[in-house]
Amino acid sequence: MKTLLNIICSKKVKYSLILIILLGIYIFISAFSYVTSVSSELQDSIFRLHVIANSDTKEDQNLKYIVRDKLIEYMNSISLNANNKEEAMQIAKQHIKDFEEIAKQTIIDNGYNYDVEVEIGNFSFPTKTYGDISIPAGLYDALRVKIGEAKGQNWWCVMFPPLCFVNVSSGIVPDESKKVLENELSEEEYSIISDTDSKEVKLKFKIIELFQNSNILTAKK
């Protein structure tokens, strides 16, 4: 009798373990699919700016911000009619030499002679908050500007839709920028980056961060 009970119990344990494993696999696949979908949509809608300072000295960090401001000002002036990320990227590509010249001249005007490297590519970004909008970590297309030896702290923002604003301390993203994001993203995706009050949304955002930070999603487009 004991042997029979042991066999039954043993089978129940095995079946329970199998069910737990299958449930775990299902949850992982579902989460992976969800994160892939949301991340892909965000990456297809956002064009970013990445400025790297020569060093971490106070002077080089200040120079980084001055260069940043000039580049943002120029980008805003030439991309007023951009309706989506692709158009914004195309405009940036057509004027990449201008970005380089503006950065170089700004550096010279401020008394430095650093070289500048400007390129457009797909780069890894950490989670960043712009006012009341948070963009999860991931691979994003960006205009990257490397000043001098580019060994200083980075500065990131979103060039399209225009979330780059000089006074980020205000904590407010312009309504027109939010509108562009809303038009580009699904309701679910927009809520993830803008709804900071919902516990459910916060959990979804954390799941995306977990997958991105663990390098599970590393394939570039």
Image (cartoon, helix red, strand yellow):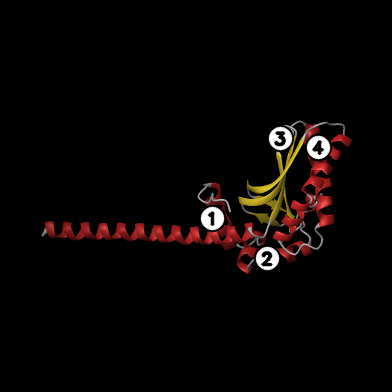
Q: CA distance from mark 1 to mark 3?
A: 32 Å
- Contact? badges 4 and 3 (CB < 8 Å): no
Q: Which mark is residue 184?
A: 2
* Side (left or right) of 40 relative to 87: left
Are circles 4 and 2 on residues that touch, CB within 8 Å? no
Q: Disc 4 designates what residue?
A: 62
In 3D space, how far apart are the residues under numbered discs 3 and 2 (Cα atoms)? 33 Å
Distance, label 4 to label 3, CA atoms, is 14 Å
Name above or below for residue 187 compared with residue 51. below
- Position of residue 148 in the picture relative to residue 77 (left or right): left
Q: In the picture shown, does residue 93 fall above or below 41? A: above
Q: Are marks 3 and 2 in contact (CB under 8 Å)?
A: no
Tag 3 secondary structure: loop
Does residue 15 appear in this view? yes
Q: Residue at x 62, y 53 (%)?
A: 136
- Give the percent coordinates (x, y) of residue 156: 71, 47
Q: Earlier in the sequence, mark 4 or mark 3?
A: 4
Q: Earlier in the sequence, mark 3 or mark 2?
A: 3
Give the residue at mark 3. 150
- What is the distance, in whole Å, between disc 2 and disc 1 at their CAs? 22 Å
